[in-house]
Image (cartoon, grey):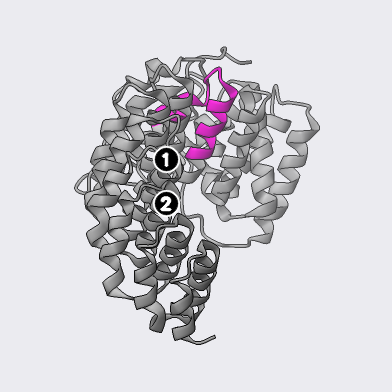
Amino acid sequence: MGLESLADRLRSQDAGERRRAAEALAAVGAPAAACLREALLDPDPRVRSEAVDALGELRDPESLAPLRGLLNDPDSWVRQRAARALGNRGDAEAVPALCRALRDDAEGVRHHAAEALGEIGDPEAAWPLCEALARDPDEVSDAVPASLASLGRPAVEGLLEVLRGPAPAARCRAARVLGAIGDRKAVPALSQALLDPDPGVRLAAVEGLGGIPDRRAVPALCILLQDPSSDLARRAAQSLAQLRDVACVPPLCVAAAGRRDPAAQASREALLSFGHEAIVPLCTMLRVPDEATRRAAVDLLVSIAREDPAPELRHAVPTLRRLALGPGGSDDPAFLDAVELIEQVTESLGDLPMPASAPDEAPEDLPIASQAPAHEAARRPMATPTCSTPAPPREARWLSPLRRLLRGRGSGP
């Protein structure tokens, strides 16, 4: 059917006929733009909706102003379609009207307005989106946090305000979006959120910190490995795995040994994700007085020897021999098997150099894991790395968290 015939059908007295004509015009494409603009004025909302959908796919600049006007249409379905069409078209001039639509009475309109603002990507939408997040967090569309995450850094200041707000649901969403954006400016506020009275906010803060590559979060996350909440401890271990700072290896080893729940398994998985980078600090853990921690370190070293062997494994051999065969040594077959396996692996590596050396002092005097509550840990000062300050020696970075974060689980054997 030709364009003229379809245009005539748009003037039919039958609303169903006009709607079908609008659908057919959408398939015609750009030549039908003028007819579709005319259909935006149709008295039937179904016809207007079809025309909006069609114009949302066309690159017709003359249709943008009428589409913006339809954000005030009396029919919520038309307003929703108009918001979606403007997002598809990437119309920056529609941003103020779309921001106003975030307060629309219809949930579908609010959702598509938020989604459109994310697609357009104008930083001016950041504050209105943050206000929408804080205003009604229990009913807010998932499109609001998704659009804020897509806006990135321009949204950070507003999200930090939401994180300090009164609504726990809004604080949860803000923490997760800040983690998705990954701006280091959010680390202090997210670390403070680990003290939040709402457990959901604390969990969201842990998740958010895991998404930001910043060592300042490591001490507080290490303390949370001993949190009574298994979910919180498990997520702390996962976040530490994402941060990949070897300073957290000793606390993770203690957590892997000290619990029998999903948090311990997550700590073990986090350690294994470090691969050979965890070998030297794990060798340090062979010397602590707590037997459960030593056993966990042995088990982890054996797993790494099988999956990611490296010359650093030679550091473990003397201590393992002493534990298995020396005076007062263990008669546990696991130690003997570990010695045999690691010696075989290190022999197979030949004369490859060892890039790091294990600390000479054995940390038998170091305190072992505590059940220190998270609120005490989070109040402890956290070092802030700067570009002008070199990182501390590798061994010091392993031992310092052990001394500072772990408190006596017993004097050991």
Taking the magenta stretch, the answer to whether it contains residue 223 is yes
Q: Is residue 95 above or below residue 397?
A: below
The part of the chain drawn in magenta is 219-239
Q: Residue 231: horizontal and vertical position, in percent?
A: 57, 27
How many marks are shown on the rendered structure? 2
Q: Which residue is mark 1?
A: 106
Local SS, label 2:
helix
Q: Amino acid at mark 2?
A: Gln
**195 relative to 35, above or below:** above
Q: Residues within 10 Å of mark 2 (few under 14, many from 20)?
A: many
Where the N terminus falls, by quadrant? bottom right
Q: Residue at x 44, y 85 (%)?
A: 4
- View extreme (front): residue: 13
Q: Relative to residue 387, is residue 210 depicted above or below? A: above
For this rendering, which residue is in front, 200 or 146? 146
Q: Is residue 226 within the magenta segment?
A: yes
Nearer to me, 267 or 40: 40
Which residue is situated farthest in the bottom direction here?
A: 2
Q: Is residue 91 left or right of residue 324?
A: left
**Residue 149 vs residue 338: left or right?**
left
Q: x and y percent of residue 373 in the render? A: 45, 15
Type of amino acid at the residue the image marks with label 1:
Ala
Residues at discs 2 and 1 in contact (Cβ within 8 Å):
yes
Gap in angstroms between the C-alphas marked 2 and 1: 9 Å
Quarter of the image where one finds residue 319: top right
Q: Is residue 338 visible?
A: yes
For residue 80, which numbered disc appears in the image? 2
Q: Quadrant of residue 130?
A: top left
Q: Position of residue 95 (x, y in %)?
A: 25, 54
Residue 152 visible in image? no
Q: Residue at left 65%, top 30%?
A: 262
Residue 413 falls in image quadrant: top right
